[in-house]
Image (cartoon, helix red, strand yellow):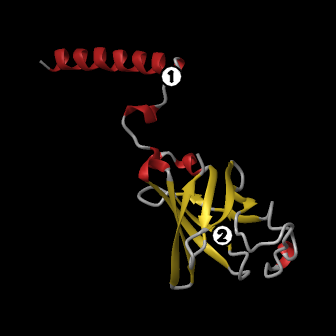
């Protein structure tokens, strides 16, 4: 009985491995087997619209990329705030980012992939309006169309919802 079960297991294992190799060769990814976009750690990359905390109006578009060495990097690609002047500088930004143009400004740095509900954590995000930098964590929702970004400053935090630009 044991030998028969092992032979059956061996046949299934060989068949599974063969099937897996064929599927990978055809371009199928393991995520196609039922995992959602929320579980794909690189899916936070893309173009996102951020919103003003008070007016809830679109304020900027941020391009988030995954750098294999440095983690996530987010730069302002377009300022959407109608009150912003063209070529506006980040006068509140600290250090080497002080007085750099908002467009192209790196506001998100680093981070570590995590498992569970929050996909990324321990990175830094800059609020160009105040010049404050926060530790962040990120998670996707609504099939990857929304990004929840929670910024921490000590025991205090606030959460923003960004929308993916189609």
Q: At which x and y percent is residue 163?
A: 55, 57
Is residue 72 visible to the viewer in this orientation of the structure?
Answer: no
Q: Quick check: 135 left or right of 115?
A: right
Q: At which x and y percent is residue 162?
A: 55, 61
Q: At which x and y percent is residue 54?
A: 56, 79
Q: Quick check: 154 left or right of 99?
A: left
> Which residue appears at 49% of the width and 30% of the height?
29
**Residue 154, placed above or below residue 120:** below
* Mark 1, other Cα within 10 Å: few <14 / some 14–19 / many ≥20: few
Q: Secondary structure at mark 2?
A: strand
Q: Which mark is residue 24?
A: 1
Q: Which residue sits furthest left?
A: 1
> Which residue appears at 72% of the width and 79% of the height?
129
Q: Which residue sits furthest bottom?
A: 155
Q: Secondary structure at mark 1?
A: helix
Please give the residue where the numbered disc 2 appears in the rendered image.
124
> Which residue appears at 57% of the width and 76% of the height?
55
Q: State the image quarter where residue 4 is shown.
A: top left
Looking at marks 2 and 1 on the same chain, the residue that comes earlier in the sequence is marked by 1
| Cα distance in 3D space between marks 2 and 1 | 36 Å
Is residue 86 visible to the viewer in this orientation of the structure?
Answer: yes
* Mark 2, other Cα within 10 Å: few <14 / some 14–19 / many ≥20: some
If the image is split into quadrants, where does the C terminus sit? top right
Q: At which x and y percent is residue 45?
A: 62, 49
Q: Are marks 2 and 1 in contact (CB under 8 Å)?
A: no
Q: Quick check: 67 left or right of 154?
A: right
Q: Which mark is residue 80?
A: none
Q: Nearer the viewer, residue 101 or 19?
A: 101
Q: Nearer the viewer, residue 54 or 161?
A: 54
């Amino acid at each position: 009985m044991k030998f028969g079960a092992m032979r059956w297991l061996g046949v299934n294992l060989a068949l599974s491995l063969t099937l897996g190799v064929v599927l990978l060769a055809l371009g199928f990814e393991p995520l196609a087997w039922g995992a959602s976009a929320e579980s794909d750690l690189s899916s936070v990359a893309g173009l996102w619209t951020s919103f003003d905390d008070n007016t809830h109006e679109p304020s900027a578009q941020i391009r988030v990329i995954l750098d294999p060495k440095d983690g996530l990097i987010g730069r302002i690609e377009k300022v959407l705030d109608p009150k912003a002047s063209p070529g506006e500088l980040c006068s509140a930004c600290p250090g080497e980012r002080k007085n750099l143009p908002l467009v192209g400004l790196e506001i998100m740095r680093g981070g570590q992939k995590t498992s569970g509900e929050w996909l990324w954590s321990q990175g830094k995000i800059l609020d160009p309006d105040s010049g404050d930098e926060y530790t962040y964590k990120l998670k996707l929702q609504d099939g990857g169309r929304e990004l929840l970004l929670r910024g921490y400053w000590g025991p205090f935090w606030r959460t923003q919802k960004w929308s993916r630009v189609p």
